[in-house]
């Protein structure tokens, strides 16, 4: 009878329990565990969302920061471009004013020279006409006198008896040989000539003459020669004046032409500078507006990200407090309600132990043995050292409890319950560690990638600025070479101009001296041959010498005029080229100044970027070092988190099943004890 009862207990102990057999306390514990898992899952999900939000904030903040830095750099560049455009405009405006003034002066000089030339031409034409008329009159008068002198009539006698030229001319008028107008003109001409001779010699005017046959004819012949000489001199003077005017006008026109071309070029440059300044000012307005928006965006982004971080921290803290409260509640329920649960749900266990101790001891031994075997098999299956140790403790507790006469289930159940709580705590700690690892790994990898990207960007920026600085330095050096070449050219021009001026001063002085000498010689010869008529045989040779000297004088005068014109053209060309060189030098000096300022700024920015790169590299080294440590902590594990969760869940499920085995065995023993008691009563 007893052996059959033990077999029945063994079969019942092996049979699995159902969920409906769980007590309310166990259901509460299970619900707390489920709630803990749900909160942990929500925390993991919230952590992922926050990680993405934090990554967005960091990336966006860096991008906006780079945009702000780029915007500030662009603002400086645009301000420099505006300053350069203004300087160019001022320089070109000054040049335009200078060129316009030069053109006005040249045009005024040309106009004045043209007006003087017109007056000279008008005076010459009037003088030429008058001299031609005089020569014609004298020629006719001489012809008439010669004709009359050849006659022997009354008119001849009257001419011979005339005491002066006026009487002779009057006789000729009376003889109708000469018109009254021609006679008046000749009388005035002779009187003027006599007055001039009187002024030149200092002798009194010769108002009368001896009535010889050739006296009046000689006088008129002399007047005729003087008129022809005066006409020739006037024509030579007019020719020289025309030539000098043409050379001066051509020089002024060339100067106006070249200066006008320079003026047009300067105006185009001024318009281009104005357009460049307007474009730069428009770009500056847009860039400044964008920069202000970026600064405002960065400020708003910082506030939003800080608020998000604060909200996440508050949620995380609240979630942690909730998990702590649930764990505390579960621990309190498990520790404080086991006795009450046994009393409420063990079906008169106390009377059973009091009334049927011997039978309960045998059944408890079998149940404890079955539970120990079940836990040991579970430890072997899951390869868990902790479960193997638990099985050993259960066996030890079972033997010690049997000897001491204590509750055979209480201590074993306490060991299993303690192991379940430990596994739950380990699961919670492992979940926290897993969340920490995922968060730290993700953040560290993001930081690592961000630092590497920053280093790459800084390297590209440094390379770009270095290349641009090198280009600017090369351009500045080239401009310095061009300025040196320009200075050398200007110095050579100055030297050549000085030499040319020295040659001109020497040659022009010689030419002027020669002209003065020729004029002096002509005056001496003309005076001599005009006064002394006794050397009539040498008069022809003297005229030839005078004519040759007049040619020499004309050649010298023409040579001096050409020399002067060439000198004036050379001076104008020198001044024009010097002005161009001065303007070119100013522009190149300005370019050198701006390029030097720009490449120095780039070198400074490159140095700052290198410093930033070194700082970021140090930060990356620190991140890599931390990353190595966190990988060793989170990655270098023989068992993955999912495997650990699966194993731990299997262990907890097995331990709960072991508890159910023990609880089912206790119920069976209680029922058997009741039936035994009722049998005793019937006996």
Image (spheres, grey):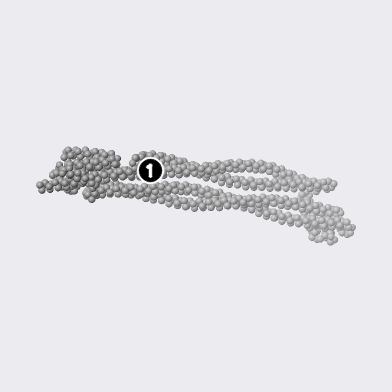
Task: Give the left or right position of residue 227, taking residue 3 as reference.
Answer: right
Location of residue 504 with respect to 108 vertically, above or below? above
Task: Give the left or right position of residue 12, taking residue 541 as reference.
Answer: left
On the rendered image, what quadrant is the N terminus found in?
Answer: top left
Q: From this viewpoint, is residue 414 visible?
A: no
Task: Give the left or right position of residue 428, taking residue 621 as reference.
Answer: left
SS under mark 1: helix
Q: Position of residue 623 (x, y in %)?
A: 39, 41
Task: Give the residue at x 44% y 42%.
Answer: 455
Q: How many marks?
A: 1
Viewer-nearest residue: 111 or 649: 649
Task: Give the residue at x 28% y 49%.
Answer: 35
Q: What residue is disc 1 on? A: 444
Location of residue 145 with respect to 410 vertically, above or below? below
Q: Position of residue 515 (x, y in %)?
A: 73, 45
Snapshot quadrant of residue 430: top left
Determine crowd level at label 1: few under 14, some 14-19, many 20+ residues with C-alpha closer than 10 A. some
- Furthest residue to the right? 152
Location of residue 479 with respect to 282 vertically, above or below? above
Viewer-nearest residue: 264 or 454: 454
Snapshot quadrant of residue 498: top right
Q: Position of residue 19 (x, y in %)?
A: 24, 49
Q: From this viewpoint, is residue 556 visible?
A: yes
Q: Position of residue 677 (x, y in %)?
A: 13, 46
């Amino acid at each position: 009878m007893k052996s059959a009862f033990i077999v029945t207990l063994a079969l019942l102990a092996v049979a699995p329990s159902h969920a409906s057999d769980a007590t309310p306390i166990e259901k509460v514990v299970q619900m707390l565990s489920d709630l803990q898992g749900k909160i942990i899952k929500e925390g993991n999900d919230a952590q992922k969302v926050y990680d993405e939000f934090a990554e967005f904030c960091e990336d966006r903040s860096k991008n906006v920061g780079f945009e702000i830095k780029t915007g500030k750099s662009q603002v400086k560049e645009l301000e420099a471009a505006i300053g350069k455009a203004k300087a160019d405009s001022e320089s070109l405006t000054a040049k335009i004013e200078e060129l316009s003034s030069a053109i006005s002066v040249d045009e005024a000089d040309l106009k004045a020279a043209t007006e003087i030339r017109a007056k000279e031409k008008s005076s010459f034409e009037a003088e030429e006409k008058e001299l031609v008329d005089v020569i014609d009159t004298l020629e006719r008068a001489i012809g008439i006198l010669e004709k009359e002198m050849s006659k022997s009539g009354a008119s001849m006698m009257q001419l011979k008896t005339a005491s002066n030229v006026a009487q002779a001319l009057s006789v000729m008028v009376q003889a109708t040989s000469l018109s009254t107008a021609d006679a008046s003109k000749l009388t005035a001409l002779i009187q003027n000539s006599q007055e001039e001779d009187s002024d030149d010699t200092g002798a009194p005017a010769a108002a009368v003459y001896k009535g010889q046959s050739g006296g009046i004819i000689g006088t008129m012949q002399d007047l005729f020669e003087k008129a022809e000489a005066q006409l020739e001199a006037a024509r030579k003077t007019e020719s020289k004046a025309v030539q000098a005017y043409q050379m001066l006008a051509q020089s002024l026109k060339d100067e106006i032409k070249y200066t006008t071309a320079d003026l047009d070029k300067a105006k185009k440059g001024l318009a281009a500078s104005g357009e460049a300044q307007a474009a730069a000012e428009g770009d500056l307005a847009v860039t400044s507006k964008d920069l202000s928006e970026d600064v405002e965006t960065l400020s708003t982004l910082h506030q939003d990200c800080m608020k998000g971080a604060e909200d996440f921290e508050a949620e995380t803290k609240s979630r942690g407090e909730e998990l702590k409260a649930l764990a505390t509640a579960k621990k309190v329920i498990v520790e404080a309600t086991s006795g009450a649960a046994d009393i409420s749900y063990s079906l008169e266990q106390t009377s059973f132990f009091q009334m049927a101790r011997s039978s309960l001891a045998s059944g408890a031994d079998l149940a404890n043995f079955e539970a120990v075997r079940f836990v040991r098999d579970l430890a072997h299956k899951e390869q868990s050292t902790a479960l193997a140790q638990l099985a050993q403790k259960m066996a030890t507790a079972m033997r010690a409890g049997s000897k001491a006469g204590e509750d055979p289930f209480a201590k074993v159940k306490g060991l299993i319950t303690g192991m379940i709580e430990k596994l739950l705590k380990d699961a919670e700690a492992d979940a926290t560690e897993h969340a920490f690892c995922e968060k730290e790994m993700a953040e560290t990898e993001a930081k690592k990638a961000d630092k590497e990207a920053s280093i790459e960007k800084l390297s590209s920026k440094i390379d770009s600025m270095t290349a641009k600085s090198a280009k600017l330095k090369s351009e500045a050096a080239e401009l310095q070479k061009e300025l040196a070449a320009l200075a050398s050219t200007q110095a050579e021009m100055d030297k050549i101009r000085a030499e040319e001026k020295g040659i001109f001063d020497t040659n022009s002085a010689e030419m002027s001296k020669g002209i003065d000498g020729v004029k002096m010689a002509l005056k001496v010869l003309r005076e001599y041959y005009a006064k002394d008529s006794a050397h009539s045989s040498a008069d022809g040779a003297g005229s030839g010498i005078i004519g040759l000297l007049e040619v020499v004088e004309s050649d010298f005068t023409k040579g001096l005029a050409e020399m002067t014109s060439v000198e004036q053209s050379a001076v104008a060309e020198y001044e024009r080229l010097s002005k161009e060189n001065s303007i070119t030098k100013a522009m190149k000096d300005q370019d050198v100044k701006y390029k030097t300022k720009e490449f120095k700024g780039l070198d400074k920015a490159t140095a700052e970027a290198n410093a930033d790169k070194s700082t970021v590299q140090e930060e990356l080294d620190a991140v890599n070092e931390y990353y190595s440590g966190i990988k060793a902590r989170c990655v270098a594990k023989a068992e993955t988190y999912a495997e650990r969760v699966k194993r731990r869940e299997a262990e907890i499920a097995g331990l709960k099943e072991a508890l159910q085995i023990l609880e089912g065995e206790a119920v069976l023993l209680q029922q058997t004890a009741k039936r035994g008691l009722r049998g005793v009563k019937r006996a």
